[in-house]
């Protein structure tokens, strides 16, 4: 049997090749893991966002219905300017709803309700800068 002896330099070079090969495989694995975690995070956030959007959408629809009923019920009790502003905000909330801009819809519904309850008046809001 003949044994093949390797020099120390050859062993060193083979060791370096093995390290380079392992390092490149680890880099590929790290990149794959990063992509996997990013996809998992995105899919979990997308699921949460859908549920949240559905809740906000239904809140927007309920707010619009409530504001519409309050507008009709309080047409004789509230100043005409406040009624006009609340009605304009109701129309704007419906537009926001059609474009799925639910936070804007909810904000306009709240402002419209504030005009009807007297928490915000058109005359005071024009005077305050």
Image (spheres, rainbow, N blue to C red):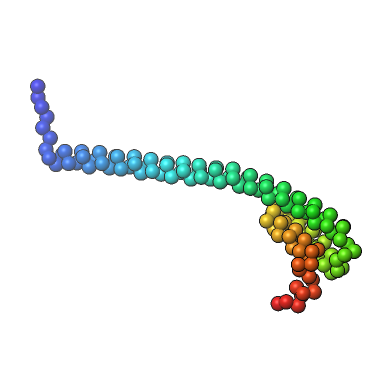
Give residue 103's position: percent from left, percent from top: 68, 56
Instruction: Work out which residue is located at the far right of the displayed protein and give it.
Output: 76
Q: Closest to the observer: 24 or 26?
A: 26
Q: Position of residue 89 (x, y in %)?
A: 78, 61
Using residue 116 as the reference point, say whether residue 1 is left or right of it: left
Front-most of residues 76 and 84:
76
Residue at 34% x, 40% y is 25
Farthest-out residue, top: 1
- Asked whether residue 98 is in view, the answer is no
Residue 68 sits in quarter: bottom right
Residue 68 seen in the current view? yes
With respect to residue 67, does 23 lie above or below? Answer: above
Left or right, 28 with respect to 118, comes to left
**Residue 117 rendering spot, x and y as whole percentages:** 79, 64
Quadrant where the N terminus is found in the figure = top left
Residue at left offset 75%, top offset 50%: 61
Q: How many marks?
A: 0
Residue 70, placed above or below residue 58 = below
**Who's the residue at 88% across and 62% down the image?**
75
Q: Is residue 67 left or right of residue 76?
A: left
Task: Say which of 6 and 121 sits in front.
Answer: 121
Quadrant housing the C terminus = bottom right
The relative height of residue 26 versus residue 100 in the rendered view (above or below) is above
In the rendered image, residue 98, in percent from the top left (x then y), is placed at 75, 52
């Amino acid at each position: 049997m003949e044994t093949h002896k390797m020099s120390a330099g050859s062993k060193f070079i083979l060791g370096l090749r093995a390290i380079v090969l392992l390092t490149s495989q680890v880099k590929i694995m790290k990149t794959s893991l990063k992509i996997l975690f990013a996809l998992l995070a995105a899919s979990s956030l997308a699921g949460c966002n859908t549920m949240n959007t559905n809740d906000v959408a239904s809140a927007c629809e309920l707010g619009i219905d409530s504001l519409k009923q309050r507008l009709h019920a309080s047409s004789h009790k509230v100043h005409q300017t406040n009624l006009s502003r609340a009605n304009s905000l109701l129309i704007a909330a419906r537009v926001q709803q059609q474009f799925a801009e639910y936070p804007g819809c909810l904000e306009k519904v709240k402002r419209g309700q504030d005009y009807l309850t007297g928490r915000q008046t058109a005359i005071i809001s024009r005077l305050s800068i």
